[in-house]
Amino acid sequence: MEVDEPSIFDLQYVLTSCSNVSPDIEEEERFAAPSLNLLGVNYEVKERVGSWYKGACFRPIRKKKVLRDITIQLRGGQLTALLGSSGSGKTSLLDVIACRTDGKVSGKVYYNNYECSKEVMKQYGAYVLQADKLLANLTVNKAIRDMGLKNVADSKIGGTIVRGISGGERRRVTVAIQLLQDPKILLLDEPTSGLDSYTARNLISSLAQLAHNGKLVLVSIHQPRSEIFKLFDQVGILSQGEMVFFGSSNKLVPYFDSIGYPCPTYANPLDHYVDLASIDRRNNDSEFQTLQRVHSLVEKFYASSIHSETADKVLEATMAPTTSRTMVRFYRPRPPNVFRVINALIGRMLINLARDRTIYITRTFMLSLFVPFICAFLGHMKNNQESIQDRIGLMYQSASVPFPHREIYITENVGMAYIQRQLFCYHMQFMRFRFMFSLVLSSALLYTGLYPEWSRFGIYYAVVFVTHFIGEIMTVGTMGVFLNPQMANTITALVLSASILYASGFLRTLSNMLDIFDWFSWVSIHKYVAEILVANEFKGLNFTCEQNGAPCQFLSGDDYLKQYYPEAVENMSRNFGALGGFMISFFVFHYRGVQDQGYTKSTLNII
Ligand SMILES: Nc1ncnc2c1ncn2[C@@H]1O[C@H](COP(=O)(O)OP(=O)(O)OP(=O)(O)O)[C@@H](O)[C@H]1O
């Protein structure tokens, strides 16, 4: 197998820096090659069909077989490529191996003698997704210290706004981050997509070197150049979820020759065979013909000696008794303790934020416009009858979550094991922002003429902060469920706007509201937020009866509370307790949701 000399930013370097192997591990265990065996694997998903306007519940569910009867063997020391046209099942096969499926998987998936599970994959595997999800403002040096990306080590990674390293270098950083945990199995979904052919070739060459050093490397790939072909040890070609070829790459051309599909001279064999296994859906005739051809290719492959040899090997491997002798333990560097991890993650996020001038500029700009506007608009609060309405307007403003959450915080693919901790760190660092923002807002509003008492200011500030914090948790939680930032923002904004309308009493008196809204208000944060805010402001306040048009209705804040929020003062502790309860339950809910979805579907990308 032909492999280039290591280049200056060769990922191979990672292996040396990561292989700080414990001396007391037996040689045999240390160098045992990983192997993956898939026997008769089927993967079926359910999808709703029909027009969206019929609603999710009324659209029929259709079962779809995404993978059929996949029997393959992958070994450490080999670079295997999965090819196939779009929709052929490459990503699904990687997902099955990584246990990231959301459908039904049948058949056997074995990692050495272990039945493959999420835990096994978390421990031994790493999955590089299609998109590079990296914190834009970190430097390569910080992200992958000593990774061999020397000439770009101090460059910012960059993103859509910040210009940074090139696409190819970014891909290398993503791969290198996964390699930090020294995985035995490395799965990469289209690592070369978006790269020019020269950079793509360099990346595949680096992966080949990693594989030849003992790792099991599996890549899905679109249209590889013919030079790249030489770097693959094994090749699998998928069509419609079935294998039309899986075996050693040097058997590929002779095999297709032998079944009557020779590769034309000067054609790239990989391109040619992928085309052969693709379905042409431009019209019924060509679809029928290509389907027939693929059907025959699959049948021929399953009848071939290449397939039966693989099947025999896989059968033997998956039938082997699981004894302590055959059970291979791999040494993995001991992970740092949880506090070090959290500390490091927070540090990284803070550095990223500190370097992100756009966030600071936008925030400062918004605050410097918003706060003076609020002060000018609501400033110099009087104590006449009209000021009751002014105060309610101010409470309304305080209970709304003012800024949409658009900062990108967690956009880095940190691997499967880190989602929980990263989420925790996200909230820790996010809290600082909200803390400061709520403080500036509360102080500015205090200046407008709220009840001048420090304890009341403290309560006011706490409520503003908690409301904003819950809004944030809701957005992140919704994001965990829908995995779509726009949708998460819209849904949270809608829910919170509805909640303030019917539960706060700021826009319509609660006694005039329909009963149904009263019931709903018990599960809305704004019922409790509003009661705390009005009790905090109105209790002990006196109003004058200036004769400027408004009838003199309330001589004191207590009168107002008695009329509209009769138990607000007595319910103060209950209301704080309820908000605490909301915070905890939203937190647990969103934590679970984000964790499960983040693992199954994709890496977190919170905007
Ligand atoms: N969870 C799912 N729900 C519905 N359909 C799915 C699901 N997962 C995969 N599929 C379908 O299975 C087929 C294979 O998808 P997959 O993403 O594995 O293809 P692919 O070869 O990786 O494609 P591409 O090269 O375009 O990324 C597609 O038709 C896809 O729509």
Image (spheres, rainbow, N blue to C red):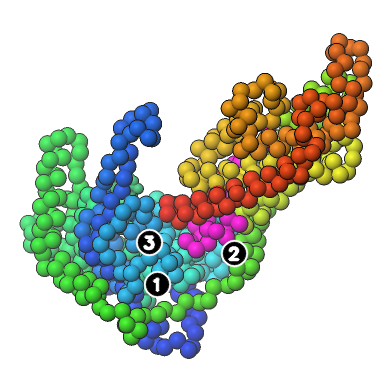
What is the crowding at mark 3: few (fewer than 14 residues within 10 Å), some, or many (at least 20)? many
The magenta segment is: 400-424
Give the amino acid at mark 1. Lys
Query: Which corner quadrant holds the N terminus?
Result: bottom left
Q: Which residue is mark 3?
A: 98
Q: Earlier in the sequence, mark 2 or mark 1?
A: 2
- Say which residue appears at 30% left-offset and 39% top-offset: 61
- Say which residue appears at 44% left-offset and 70% top-offset: 123
Whether 244 is drawn above or below 121: the answer is: above
Q: Which mark is in front, 1 or 3?
A: 3
C-alpha separation, residue under disc 1 versus residue under disc 3: 13 Å
Seen as rendered, the residue at the extreme top is 549
Q: Earlier in the sequence, mark 1 or mark 3?
A: 3
> Percent position (x, y) of residue 586?
59, 47
- Observer able to see residue 10: no
Q: Which residue is mark 2?
A: 142
Q: How many marks?
A: 3
C-alpha separation, residue under disc 3 versus residue under disc 2: 28 Å
In the picture, measured across the screen, residue 388 lies left or right of residue 20, that is right
Give the amino acid at mark 3. Ala
Q: Which residue is mark 1?
A: 184
Q: Is residue 439 magenta?
A: no
Q: For this rendering, which residue is in front, 490 or 58? A: 58
Query: Which corner quadrant holds the C terminus?
Result: top right
Mark 1 and mark 3 in contact? Answer it, CB < 8 Å.
no
Whether 231 is drawn above or below 16: the answer is: above
> Percent position (x, y) of residue 544?
92, 21
Mark 3 and mark 2 in contact? Answer it, CB < 8 Å.
no
- Say which residue appears at 50% left-offset and 69% top-offset: 180
Ligand 1 within 8 Å of the CB at mark 1 = no
